[in-house]
Amino acid sequence: MYDVKDIMETVSMIRDNNLDIRTTTMGISLIDCADTDIDKSCTKVYDKICRLAGDLVSVGEDISAKYGIPIVNKRVSVTPVSMLAGVSGGDPVKYAKALDRAANTIGINFIGGYSALVHKGFSAGDMELIESIPRALAETELVCSSVNIGSTRAGINMDAVRKMGSIIRETAELTKENQCMGAAKLVVFCNAVEDNPFMAGAFHGTGEADHVLSVGVSGPGVVRSVLAGMPKDAPLDEVSEVIKKTAFKITRVGQLVGSEAAARLNTQFGIVDLSLAPTPAIGDSVAHILEEIGLEQCGAHGTTAALAMLNDAVKKGGVMASSSVGGLSGAFIPVSEDAGMIDAAREGTLSIEKLEAMTAVCSVGLDMIVVPGDTTADVIAAIIADEAAIGMVNSKTTAVRLIPAIGLAEGEELNFGGLLGYGPVMPLRTKSPSVMIARGGRIPAPLQSLKN
Amino acid sequence: MDKQENAVLTVVGINDVGILAKTALCVAEAKGNVVQVSQIVMDKFFTMNMLIDITELEGSLKELEDALKESLPGIEVHLMHENIFNSMHRI
């Protein structure tokens, strides 16, 4: 028989502390769907997704009932669509609509991969796809888009950075009647990973198998609750140890669910992404973990150090728990999706500069940040460049998902609903970076030695 | 014969006459076999953990859990396949 304490711990993690499997994401390669006729290509895309991922939702629900653990999202990621657009030509939005139809047919929450990888330059289909992003996101419901504009080995493509500044603005403008929602489904990456199961940045990399099933685990509430049970004078190495053990348990559940889902869907198991992904629900916040470690509010001095320790401990615990860890793996800090971050932003404790520093030590980047509606495309591009530079120099993934709140000013709020949450407009520096952004070209890849 | 599969049932609530009896009846009706039970009554609170052999179970775990919830109103019932405990608590 199992130890009663262990049983009650598991039950309470799920019942009281929002432990869940955040997403089961099937990655599907669309390379064999490419056709010089765009309509034929779209039909093949739709058919392949429906054929392979048709049971994704029902299998997820079955496993959820079997283990008594919620599986919140079921999603699909596909090969970057720019590759198909490069073969077929034509209006890439047709692909977005085919993906949206497939997502609706199989009943998933999001489909990612309306993407282009342009960190070193543009090839056939890339520019067409990027220019179509605002329309694609305005005319579809479930499609997510991402663009990789830099990497440690290639440097930063500043022409793409400049372009993405205006694309983000245009995307928000086209969806301004709907809380500028389009921009919440668009991520700009540096060092994008090929096996990320989390939206909006998921795509199925070309180095992956034809189809795989990956899992993203969550559990900030569980970590916070365990820390709440520790004495306030426990040294930080003990705090780190407890986080490690908790991350281990959470990841084991991810591994269990992922391998069973993959077997039932006749696909191979991809990776467990051991990210602490917050939701706007009370008790499911990464900011509250940092506050539990001992900060009055997230954003206070000390936040970067606390986050660095948290991020590292999560990885150390998770790596031992799963034979296949990948994706983004770390702590997410999406402002509008985290109750504690929303409060800290409202009170002005959390600034964009502090968030930028935090992204140097944790997973991903400036995520789900609402910025003033009159922010220029050049300022957005400059924010992307800053964030990409952090990723490029530190050999890590960084991303930017900003939502210009068209028509709103500082102090007002956007509300996306559901897991995407809500958040106040955060102030930005208003001095112009336009001359630098207009230069374009490339920031060369950084030196990998003389690390200081 | 297939390998034996177990599920762990947790029942927590205010103590009342017949909780164990009602639980056992539901499990038996679904052709589940009770392997082990541990129960604690502290003050008026009742906590029970039951290991059930579900190899011959008729219907799904969800159906059994729903039946238990219906027969034990106001009491928390969680029924989970044992693998989740194996994964989390054993290396």
Image (spheres, rainbow, N blue to C red):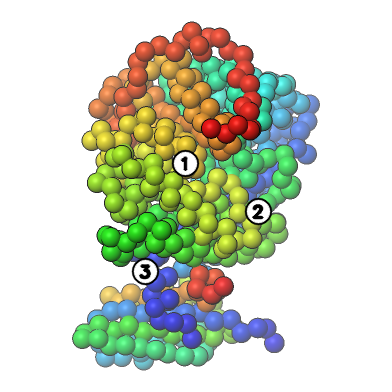
| Residue A73 point in image, percent of width and height | 50, 51
Q: Is residue A133 left or right of residue A310?
A: right
Q: Please determine if labels 1 and 3 lie on a single subunit.
A: yes
**Callout 3: 10 Å neighbours few (<14), some, many (20+)?**
some
Residue A207, image x, y percentages: 73, 42
Q: Amino acid at mark 1?
A: Val
Q: Nearer the viewer, mark 1 or mark 3?
A: 1
Mark 1 highlights which residue?
A: A361
Q: Is residue A315 above or below residue B57?
A: above
User: How far, Cα to Cα, is label 1 from label 3?
Assistant: 30 Å
Do the CB atoms of the residues marked 2 and 1 lie less than 8 Å apart? no
Q: Which mark is residue A12?
A: 3
Marks 2 and 1 sit apart, C-alpha to C-alpha, by 25 Å
Which residue is identified by label 2?
A: A270
Q: Nearer the viewer, residue A247 or A174?
A: A247
Q: Is residue A70 visible?
A: no
As helix, strand or loop, the secondary structure at mark 3 comes to helix
Q: Does label 2 or label 1 sit earlier along the sequence?
A: 2
